[in-house]
C-alpha cells in the first residue's frame, strides 16, 4: 500500500498550478506536504483526493492508476481524507457521522431496515458498537448523541479524523489539521496523529501551515513552491535547506542562514 | 409563416422579458425566487382596469388612445412599485438573514395572499380590457404586424433601455450592481442595503406592472390567477438567460417567446408550453448556469 | 438529555397514540364530509412525506411533485379502465412508473443545484400536465371518469369510511418507511449528501446514485397517492395536478418541519385540512393562509416541528462560496 505521485501537473485555464511533481509516500509514514501560500499544496492534495483530475501525470496506489477515478471511489482504494475547514454532517449526531464513515462496510439494503431483519439488527448494533468504542477511545464518548454542529471546534476536528479512520483506509489525507486550533489543541492533535500511526498502522499524508506541528509530527517532508517540488527529506534537513528558506522568507534570509 | 411566428414570439417574449427582469434583479441581490412577482404583474393589470374605468372608458369593446394608455401605464407602474416595496418590507425583510427556503415559503405565502385578496376584492371572474388601436395592423414581408404588437415591443424596449441606463449610470443603479456583485464589500463601502433592496423591488415590480397592462390590453382580459402562468414563464425566462443577469433576462424572455410561438406553430399548439420547458431542461443540462452566466464586470 | 434523543423517544411515544386516534376517528365522526377531508389529508400526507425524502432527507429542491401524483393517478386509472387490472396491481405498476420517472427527473439533479433544479422540476410538473391535457389516451381536458374503486375478495372500498382506512394505512406505511429509512445505510447516505456532498463522497457515498434514487422513492410514493386519489374520487382531469399543488405540497413539508417524520403530516393537516374546515369563511381562508405562511417563516423558520438547521444550511452555502474564493486565489497566486 504505497502511494505514488508521478509527474503530476495541473493547469487552470492557462495558469500552471503544479508542474511535474513526483514523490512516493512510504507505508506507515507520517508524510508532510508544505510550502508557502499559493505553492500548489491544496491543488495537489485535491488531486490525490480525487476532487480534481491532473492535467498530466498519474496517481498510483499499489500499482493502480487513480487519476481518472471519481472521488467517491477513493475509499475503495483505501484512501480517506479530512477537510481544511471541517466538513462534518452538521445535522446528524456524532454517532451518525461515524456510521456514515462505515458506508462501504455495511451491506444491508434499505428494505431490510423496513422489516427489521436479524441481519439488519446485527449489522446496526455492531456498527454502533464499533463507533461508540472509537468515540470512547478519542474522548468523544459522552457526546455521541449530540448534533455534530454543537461540538466545539477542536472536537469537531477530532470527530472528522475519527470519521476518516473508521473507513479503515490505509492512507489518511489530512488537509491542514491544525488550522484554527490553539496550542493545547495542537499538542493534542500531534499526539493523536502519532497514535493513529503507531497503534493503528496507518499512513498519513498531511498538508499543513503550522510549522510547529509539521516539524514535530512529520517524518518526511516534500516542499512545494510555485507548483514545483523544491526539496524533499527529513524535517531536520529541510530546516537547513537554503532553497526552502528562500521560498519562505526571501533571498536575504536565505543568504544569512547560509553564511 | 416563420416570420409571422417570429413577430408574435417577439411581442410575447418582450413581455416575458419585462417580468423576468424583476425575478432576476431580486435573485441577483437576495438569492431567492420571489414567487409573488407574478401576482404583482396581475395587480398591474387590475390597476389599469380601474384607471380606465375611472377615466370613463368602456372596458367591453372600448378603445383607448395612446395618451390614455400612458395615463394608465405610469400610475400603475408607481402603484406596483409601491406594492413591491411593501411586500419586501413586510414579508422578506424580517427573514433576510434566514435561509433561502424560508424566503421561498414566505414568497409562496405572499403569492397566495395577493392572489386571493385580488379574488376577494375584484371577484374571480375574467373581466374584459379595452383595446388599443382597435385591431389595426400593417404587413411586412407577408407577416401581419398589429399596432398593438408594435406598441408592446416599443414600450418594452424603451423600458429596458431606461433600466439599462439607470443601472449603468445612476448612483443608485451602481449601488444595485455593487450589491449584486459582492454584498459584503458593498456594505463595507457604505452602501445602504435596505435602500438598495427596496429600490430593486420597486423597479422590478414597476416593470412587472407595465407588463401586466400590456398583456391585459394585448389579450383583452384580466383575472386574478393570471399571475401564476406568466410568473412561471418569466421565471423560466430568467433562468434560461442565467438568473441574476439582467441582459440575460431580456434575452431569455425574448427567446422563450420565440421558442413558444415557433414550437406552437410547427410542432403542436397544445404542446407549446411543454416544448418551452423541454428546451429549458436541455439548455440547463448543457449549460447549467443559463445562457449568459452572471459574471463580474 | 440531548435534543436528538429527546425527539426520538417522543416520536416513539406519540406514534401509537396517533395511530389509535386515527383508527377510532370514524366512529366519532358522523358526517361523511369530515371523513372526506381526512382522506384528503391522508393523501396530502403521503405526498408531503414523499417529497420530504427528496427535499428534507436528500437536500434536493423539487417543485414538480404534483407531476408524480398525476402520473400515479393516470397510470393506475388507465390500467384499470383499459386493461381491466385490479386496483392493487394497477397501484403497484403506477408506483413503478413513479419510480422510473423519479429516476429520470433525478438525472438532471446530478448537474443542477438549488434554483436551477427548482425550475427543472417545476417544468417536469408542467410537462406532465400538458401531456395529460393533450394526449388522446388521457382524454385531454375532459379527464377520465368512472375509475373503479379498490376491491378485495368481494369487499369494495366504496364507502368514505373504507377509503379512509385504506388511505390512512397507506399514509402510515409511507411514514413508517420514511422513519425506518433514517436508520438504514441508504437513509444515512441520503442525509450525508444533504449535509455535505463533498464530505459524503470522501467517505465513499456515490452522490449521483443516492440523489437519483431519492427522486425515485419520492416519485414512487407520490404515485401511490395518485392511484389512491384516482380510485377515491373516481374522476381525474389535468386541472387537479397544477403547479399550485406542487407548491402547496412543498409548503406542507416546510411548515410542518423539514426532514422530520411527523412534520409533513402536520403540514398536511394545516394546509389541506384548515381550508376545508374553514370553508364558510370563503376567500378569507386562503388570504389568512398566505399570511400564516409568512408569519411562520418569520417566527419559526425551521417549521413547527423543525429540528433541521435551516440557518446552518445557509451558512453552508456561504462557506462554500468562501471555499471557492480561497481556491480561486490559490490559483492566481500560482502564476
Image: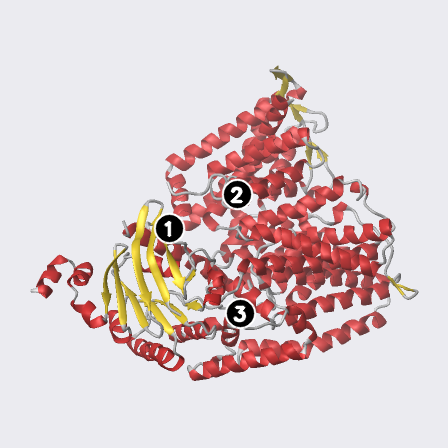
Name the residue tied to disc 2. B286
In this view, the residue in front, B16 or B66, is B16
Q: CA distance from mark 1 to mark 2?
A: 23 Å
Instruction: Tell me which colouring the rendered structure shows.
Output: secondary structure
**Are dots 1 and 2 on a single chain?**
no
In this view, the residue in front, B39 or B11, is B11
Nearest to viewer (mark 1 / mark 2): 1
Where residue A104 is drawn, which disc sits there?
3
Name the residue tied to disc 1. A55
**Element class at badge 3:** loop
- Residue C90 location in percent, x, y? 80, 57
Mark 2 neighbour class, 10 Å CA radius: few under 14, some 14 to 19, many 20 or more: few
- Tell which subunit mark 1 falls on: A
How many numbered markers are drawn? 3
- Tell which subunit mark 3 falls on: A
Q: Is residue B78 visible?
A: no
Residue at 30% x, 63% y: name it.
A23
Is residue A252 toward the left or the right of residue A132 in the image?
left
Residue at the farthest front position: A63
Q: Is residue C9 above or below residue A209?
A: below
Q: Is residue A111 above or below residue B25?
A: below
**Are dots 3 and 1 on a single chain?**
yes
Residue at the farthest left position: A259
- Residue C144 location in percent, x, y? 83, 47
**Element class at badge 1:** loop
Q: CA distance from mark 3 to mark 2?
A: 32 Å
Residue at 81% x, 74% y: name it.
C24
In this view, the residue in front, C77 or C93, is C93
Amino acid at each position: 500500500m504505497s502511494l505514488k505521485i508521478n509527474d503530476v501537473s495541473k493547469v487552470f485555464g492557462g495558469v500552471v498550478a503544479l508542474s511535474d511533481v513526483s514523490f512516493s509516500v512510504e507505508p506507515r509514514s507520517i508524510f508532510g506536504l508544505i510550502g508557502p501560500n499559493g505553492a500548489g499544496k491544496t491543488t495537489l492534495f485535491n488531486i490525490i483526493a480525487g476532487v480534481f483530475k491532473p492535467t498530466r501525470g498519474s496517481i498510483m496506489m499499489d500499482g493502480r492508476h487513480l487519476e481518472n477515478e471519481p472521488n467517491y471511489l477513493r475509499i475503495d482504494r483505501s484512501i480517506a481524507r479530512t477537510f481544511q475547514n471541517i466538513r462534518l454532517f452538521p445535522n446528524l449526531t456524532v454517532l451518525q457521522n461515524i456510521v456514515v464513515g462505515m458506508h462501504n462496510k455495511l451491506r444491508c439494503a434499505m428494505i431490510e431496515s423496513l422489516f427489521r431483519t436479524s441481519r439488519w439488527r446485527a449489522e446496526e448494533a455492531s456498527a454502533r458498537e464499533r463507533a461508540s468504542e472509537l468515540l470512547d477511545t478519542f474522548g468523544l464518548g459522552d457526546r455521541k448523541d449530540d448534533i455534530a454542529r454543537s461540538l466545539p471546534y477542536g472536537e469537531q476536528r477530532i470527530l472528522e479524523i475519527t470519521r476518516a479512520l473508521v473507513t479503515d483506509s490505509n492512507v489518511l489525507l489530512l488537509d491542514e489539521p491544525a488550522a484554527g486550533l490553539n496550542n493545547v489543541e495542537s499538542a493534542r492533535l500531534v499526539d493523536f496523529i502519532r497514535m493513529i500511526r503507531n497503534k493503528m498502522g496507518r499512513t498519513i499524508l498531511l498538508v499543513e501551515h503550522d510549522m510547529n506541528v509539521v516539524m514535530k509530527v512529520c517524518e518526511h517532508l516534500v516542499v512545494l513552491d510555485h507548483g514545483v517540488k523544491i526539496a524533499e527529506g527529513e524535517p531536520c534537513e529541510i530546516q537547513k535547506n537554503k532553497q526552502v528558506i528562500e521560498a519562505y522568507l526571501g533571498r536575504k534570509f536565505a543568504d544569512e542562514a547560509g553564511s | 409563416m416563420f416570420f409571422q411566428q417570429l413577430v408574435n414570439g417577439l411581442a410575447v417574449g418582450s413581455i416575458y422579458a419585462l417580468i423576468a427582469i424583476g425575478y432576476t434583479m431580486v435573485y441577483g441581490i437576495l438569492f431567492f425566487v420571489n414567487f409573488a412577482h407574478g401576482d404583482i404583474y396581475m395587480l398591474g393589470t387590475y390597476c389599469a382596469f380601474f384607471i380606465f374605468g375611472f377615466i370613463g372608458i368602456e372596458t367591453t369593446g372600448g378603445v383607448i388612445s395612446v395618451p390614455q394608455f400612458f395615463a394608465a401605464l405610469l400610475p400603475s407602474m408607481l402603484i406596483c412599485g409601491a406594492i413591491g416595496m411593501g411586500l419586501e418590507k413586510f414579508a422578506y425583510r424580517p427573514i433576510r438573514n434566514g435561509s433561502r427556503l424560508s424566503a421561498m415559503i414566505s414568497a409562496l405565502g405572499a403569492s397566495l395572499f395577493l392572489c386571493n385578496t385580488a379574488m376577494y376584492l375584484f371577484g374571480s371572474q375574467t373581466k374584459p380590457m379595452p383595446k388599443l388601436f382597435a385591431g389595426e395592423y400593417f404587413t411586412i414581408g407577408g407577416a401581419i404586424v398589429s399596432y398593438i404588437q408594435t406598441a408592446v415591443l416599443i414600450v418594452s424596449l424603451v423600458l429596458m433601455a431606461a433600466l439599462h441606463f439607470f443601472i449603468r449610470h445612476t448612483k443608485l443603479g451602481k449601488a444595485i450592481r455593487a450589491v449584486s456583485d459582492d454584498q459584503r464589500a458593498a456594505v463595507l463601502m457604505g452602501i445602504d442595503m435596505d435602500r438598495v433592496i427596496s429600490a430593486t423591488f420597486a423597479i422590478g415590480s414597476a416593470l412587472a406592472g407595465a407588463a401586466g397592462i400590456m398583456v391585459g390590453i394585448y389579450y383583452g382580459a384580466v383575472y386574478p390567477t393570471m399571475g401564476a402562468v406568466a410568473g412561471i414563464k418569466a421565471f423560466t425566462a430568467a433562468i434560461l438567460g442565467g438568473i441574476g443577469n439582467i441582459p440575460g433576462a431580456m434575452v431569455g424572455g425574448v427567446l422563450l417567446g420565440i421558442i413558444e410561438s415557433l414550437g406552437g406553430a410547427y410542432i403542436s399548439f397544445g404542446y407549446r408550453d411543454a416544448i418551452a420547458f423541454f428546451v429549458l431542461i436541455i439548455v440547463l443540462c448543457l449549460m447549467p448556469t443559463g445562457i449568459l452566466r452572471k459574471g463580474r464586470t | 438529555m440531548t435534543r436528538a434523543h429527546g425527539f426520538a423517544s417522543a416520536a416513539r411515544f406519540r406514534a401509537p397514540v396517533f395511530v389509535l386516534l386515527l383508527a377510532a376517528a370514524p366512529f366519532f365522526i358522523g358526517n361523511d364530509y369530515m371523513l372526506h377531508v381526512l382522506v384528503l389529508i391522508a393523501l396530502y400526507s403521503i405526498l408531503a412525506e414523499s417529497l420530504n425524502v427528496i427535499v428534507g432527507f436528500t437536500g434536493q429542491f423539487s417543485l414538480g411533485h404534483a407531476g408524480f401524483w398525476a402520473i400515479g393517478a393516470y397510470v393506475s386509472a388507465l390500467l384499470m379502465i383499459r386493461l381491466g387490472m385490479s386496483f392493487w396491481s394497477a397501484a403497484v405498476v403506477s408506483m413503478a412508473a413513479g419510480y422510473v420517472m423519479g429516476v429520470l427527473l433525478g438525472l438532471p439533479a446530478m448537474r443542477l443545484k438549488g434554483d436551477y433544479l427548482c425550475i427543472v422540476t417545476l417544468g417536469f410538473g408542467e410537462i406532465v400536465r400538458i401531456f395529460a391535457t393533450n394526449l388522446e389516451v388521457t382524454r385531454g381536458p375532459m379527464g377520465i371518469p368512472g375509475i373503479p374503486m379498490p376491491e378485495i375478495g368481494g369487499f369494495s372500498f366504496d364507502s368514505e369510511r373504507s377509503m379512509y382506512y385504506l388511505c390512512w394505512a397507506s399514509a402510515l406505511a409511507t411514514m413508517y418507511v420514511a422513519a425506518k429509512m433514517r436508520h438504514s445505510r441508504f437513509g444515512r447516505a441520503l442525509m450525508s449528501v444533504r449535509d455535505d456532498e463533498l464530505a459524503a463522497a470522501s467517505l465513499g457515498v456515490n452522490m449521483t446514485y443516492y440523489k437519483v434514487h431519492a427522486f425515485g422513492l419520492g416519485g414512487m410514493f407520490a404515485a401511490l397517492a395518485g392511484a389512491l386519489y384516482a380510485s377515491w374520487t373516481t374522476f381525474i382531469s389535468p386541472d387537479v395536478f397544477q403547479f399550485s399543488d406542487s407548491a402547496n405540497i412543498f409548503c406542507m413539508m416546510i411548515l410542518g418541519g423539514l426532514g422530520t417524520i411527523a412534520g409533513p403530516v402536520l403540514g398536511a393537516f394545516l394546509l389541506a385540512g384548515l381550508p376545508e374546515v374553514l370553508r364558510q369563511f370563503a376567500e378569507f381562508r386562503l388570504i389568512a393562509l398566505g399570511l400564516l405562511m409568512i408569519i411562520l417563516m418569520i417566527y419559526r423558520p425551521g417549521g413547527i416541528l423543525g429540528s433541521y438547521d435551516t440557518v446552518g444550511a445557509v451558512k453552508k452555502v456561504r462557506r462554500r462560496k468562501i471555499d471557492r474564493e480561497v481556491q480561486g486565489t490559490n490559483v492566481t497566486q500560482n502564476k
